[in-house]
Amino acid sequence: MTETAVGSKSEQAYAAVKARIVDGTYSPGYRLVLAKIAEDLGVSVVPVREAIRRLEAEGLVKFERNVGATVSGIDPTEYLYTMQTLSIIEGAATALSAPLIGPADIARAREVNAEMRDCLEHFDPVRFTALNQDFHSVLFEHCPNPHILDLVHRGWNRLASIRASTFRFVPGRAHESVDEHEALLQLIESNADADTIEQAARRHRAATLDAYLAQSNAGSLSAH
Amino acid sequence: MTETAVGSKSEQAYAAVKARIVDGTYSPGYRLVLAKIAEDLGVSVVPVREAIRRLEAEGLVKFERNVGATVSGIDPTEYLYTMQTLSIIEGAATALSAPLIGPADIARAREVNAEMRDCLEHFDPVRFTALNQDFHSVLFEHCPNPHILDLVHRGWNRLASIRASTFRFVPGRAHESVDEHEALLQLIESNADADTIEQAARRHRAATLDAYLAQSNAGSLSAH
DNA sequence: GAGTACGAAATCGTATACGATAACTATGGC
DNA sequence: GCCATAGTTATCGTATACGATTTCGTACTC
């Protein structure tokens, strides 16, 4: 998974800025000054500008004319939008992948899920989150539609960016989550029909959103 | 709907190239030469490059290092991917919009649908397609989640680009389509539950895809 | 005649430079 | 002391220039 080929400086800048947004180095609201980033990366501003505009099209960055770029997603509403969208996309991606998921994949997912349970016992939310991504990656990586897969990845990136700054771990929800993971695996193993799997996967994420809403009282999607 | 503000030259280039792709001036496979486009638009290559990279992130353009950009979507498989993705996004968008659609919207949609019937009698597939977009726009424009709405628009753009070059009108499917439109409106009017509306909207597009597949024998999504 | 090597042309990729715009700061009036 | 205004600074936006890479055409060899 290591990106050996550096590619053009434009792509280098794209990858670098994206990575910094996803890992939280640049938090939501962070002001992205072109000249500064260019200097940091040892390139000129042109490729950086290009990279930022690409990230804007992916939703990770907000761009304002003659003002500059900021990392998007600082607004709790954005989180709701992202989670809702991801719930839909993920549900579909999981359902489409299901027929292509083999016993080896299931075993790997169970392994990851077991590690997640360990994280709950030793209270390691950071690792838990990382493993959670691994778990779902196993489910998604066989998705036959690359467009949908791409949308899932974008959603995860936005989520990672938001979480890196406003992370809140809800232990109760986390326990539910690993149980739902196992239920999902059993549905897939038993060749359940696509709709059932889709609904289960969708509710899995929607429940996380609900837990967040219940905790933060951040408002609801319908009241806007 | 006229874009009065020209904005920066970068955005001008973005809008111009996008429009040309969507309306078919630049068909799928068309080679986008930066210098040529820059000259056409009376700007330098830098903003054009930026615009192209943004369009790439939206999926309208394919970019290859040191080679150049081409309009994407020439492959029938791409059409399948796009339709499948759109079916999912549209279904969700329609379901989310439904509670916010008022009698005036319904009336407007019925008006458009009536015109679509006229187009079938006088065999005007081009206008039929344009009205079809209008019809669905009425259903989508109230979608409370801007991310989802954005994905719908992107899907329609890609579709328009593909259709502009490989359009095939299937009269039988078109008749079904207007009937399904009316059925959709009735579901919305009767405050049907979200799942029902979502499934109906999704099947509406999926049926169009099936009709295409049946006619062209272009293969299936599962065989890849 | 087919394949290969070389050279020319086209095109991309990025640095630099400079004008344009917005944000900030300080000064003066009330 | 507060607001308005002018000047300054920081940053963006784009044109131009030039090096790097690919592609295409041509000549040469087998």
Image (cartoon, coloured by chain):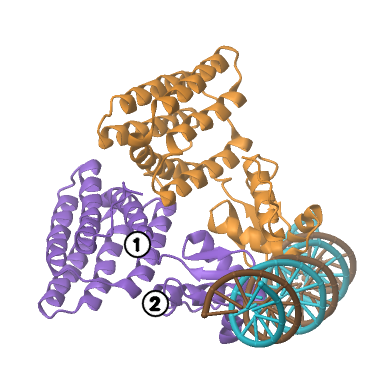
Chain colours: A orange, B purple, C brown, D cyan
Earlier-in-chain disc, 1 versus 2? 2
- The x and y percentages for residue D5 are 77, 75
Residue at figure coordinates x 38%, y 70% from the top left: B161
Seen at 32% across and 52% down, the residue is B84
Can residue A130 be seen?
A: yes
Within 10 Å of disc 2 (Cα), the crowding (few <14, some 14-19, many 20+) is some
Judge if badges 1 and 2 mark residues of a common chain.
Answer: yes
The amino acid type of the residue labelled 1 equals Pro
Q: Secondary structure at mark 1?
A: helix
Looking at the rendering, which quadrant does residue B46 occupy?
Answer: bottom right
Relative side of A90 to C10, left or right = left
Residue drawn at the location 47% of the way across and 32% of the way down: A138
Q: Which residue is mark 1?
A: B76
Mark 1, Cα crowd under 10 Å, few <14 / some 14-19 / many 20+, is some
For mark 2, give the secondary structure.
Answer: loop
Does residue B134 appear left or right of residue B189 in this picture? right
Residue picked out by circle 2: B24
Callout count? 2
* Chain of residue at mark 1: B
What type is the residue that disc 2 sits on? Gly
Q: Nearer the viewer, residue C22 or A52?
A: A52
Q: Which is in the foreground here, disc 1 or disc 2?
A: 1
Q: Position of residue B58 (x, y in %)?
A: 49, 60
